[in-house]
Amino acid sequence: MRRQPFFGITVVHCERGALRQSPDGVYVYDANGRRELAAGEGSKRGAGELLELADALAEGREPFLDAAWGRATLEVCVAIIESSAAKREVELKYQHPAKVLAAW
């Protein structure tokens, strides 16, 4: 039984290897071959975002993931569906650079 949702293949190419989701975590492909890093038990989609919000509230600071981030993320999700249905590119209007962690 899979512990995490599957929305299609995502591959991330890095300087020394590549990452791809697995049914239970992430496959790491590097000079040593392939290994799997398992997702923690009980990990839930969106849990990291909620923990970051809780930390921001507890520390009295603005959250890294703000309303503009949420709107931009939702826009991408809706555009993927619209683009697939219409078989064309969809222009994005609400995207913006992410906050720089070092300055944040």
Image (cartoon, helix red, strand yellow):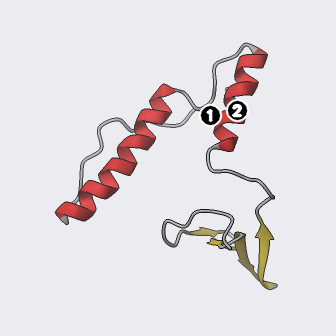
Sequence order check, earlier mark of 2 and 1: 2
Of circles 2 and 1, which is in front? 2
> As displayed, is residue 73 above or below residue 65?
below
**How far from the left and from the top, in percent, is residue 61?**
69, 16
Count of labels in the image: 2
> Could you tell me the amino acid type at mark 1?
Val
> Could you tell me the amino acid type at mark 2?
Glu
> As displayed, is residue 44 above or below residue 17?
above
Residue drawn 48% across and 26% down?
Answer: 67
Residue drawn 64% across and 38% down?
Answer: 49
Marks 2 & 1, CB-CB < 8 Å contact:
no
Residue drawn 17% across and 61% down?
Answer: 86
**How far from the left and from the top, in percent, is residue 22?**
66, 73
In this rendering, would 97 be left or right of 46? left
Q: Quadrant of the N terminus?
A: bottom right
**How far from the left and from the top, in percent, is residue 95?**
39, 39
Residue reaching furthest to the bottom: 33
Residue drawn 66% across and 73% down?
Answer: 23
Label 1: few (<14), some (14–19) or many (≥20) C-alpha neighbours in 10 Å: few
In this rendering, would 52 be left or right of 88? right
Compare residues 31 and 56 and report the one nearer the observer.
Answer: 56
Label 2: few (<14), some (14–19) or many (≥20) C-alpha neighbours in 10 Å: some
Q: Name the residue under label 1.
A: 100
In this rendering, would 80 be left or right of 4? left
> As displayed, is residue 17 above or below residue 83?
below
Q: Spatial distance from mark 2 to mark 1, Cα to Cα?
A: 15 Å
Q: Mark 2 points at which residue?
A: 52
* Dot label at residue 11: none
**How far from the left and from the top, in percent, is residue 41?**
80, 58
Residue 102 in view in this figure: no
In this rendering, would 11 be left or right of 29? left
Secondary structure of the residue carrying tag 1 is loop
